[in-house]
Amino acid sequence: MKIADQILGYVRRLHPAQRRAIKTALRRLETGTGADTMPLEDDLEGFYRLRMGKFRIVYRYLQKGEISCEFIDVRATVYEQFTSMQEFIGRSRQNPPH
């Protein structure tokens, strides 16, 4: 399982009980045992969400079934923030600095 730096930094700032809950949810996702997941739609098609209380992790499957956890935030803002980040990355790849 690959975990983005954004997730590692975000989780470090949380209360220890929240960190434990997120780690447990990630273990369940990795082993396929009872993680609360759902595929995303529209602009985020190809990504999935892992729900842990008020938090959501956006992830995707790579080749050979490897999981790449991309982004975490609270439910109220996670999808908007992640979509904005994806659009920014897409624009910077199309227009690299000279």
Image: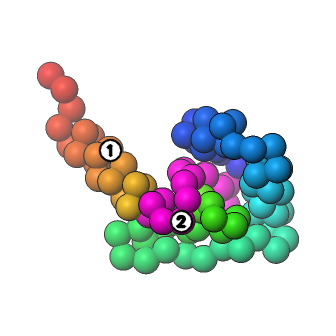
Residue assigned mark 2 = 75
Residue 20 x/y as whole percent: 83, 50
Residue 14 x/y as whole percent: 69, 43
The foreground one among 72 and 30 is 72
Residue 28 x/y as whole percent: 81, 63
Give yes or no for residue 89 being in the magenta stretch. no
The kind of residue on which mark 2 rests is Arg
Q: Is residue 96 left or right of residue 15?
A: left
Residue assigned mark 1 = 89
**Region rendered in magenta:** 58-79
Identify the residue at horizontal 76%, vertical 70% (top origin): 35
Q: Residues within 10 Å of mark 2 (few under 14, many from 20)?
A: some
Identify the residue at horizontal 67%, vertical 61% (top origin): 65
Q: Quadrant of the C terminus?
A: top left
SS at circle 2? loop
Rendered image quadrant of residue 77: bottom left
Q: Is residue 30 visible?
A: no
Identify the residue at horizontal 22%, vertical 45% (top origin): 91
Q: Is residue 9 left or right of residue 53?
A: left
Q: Image height check: is 32 above or below 7?
A: below
Identify the residue at horizontal 71%, vertical 49% (top origin): 1
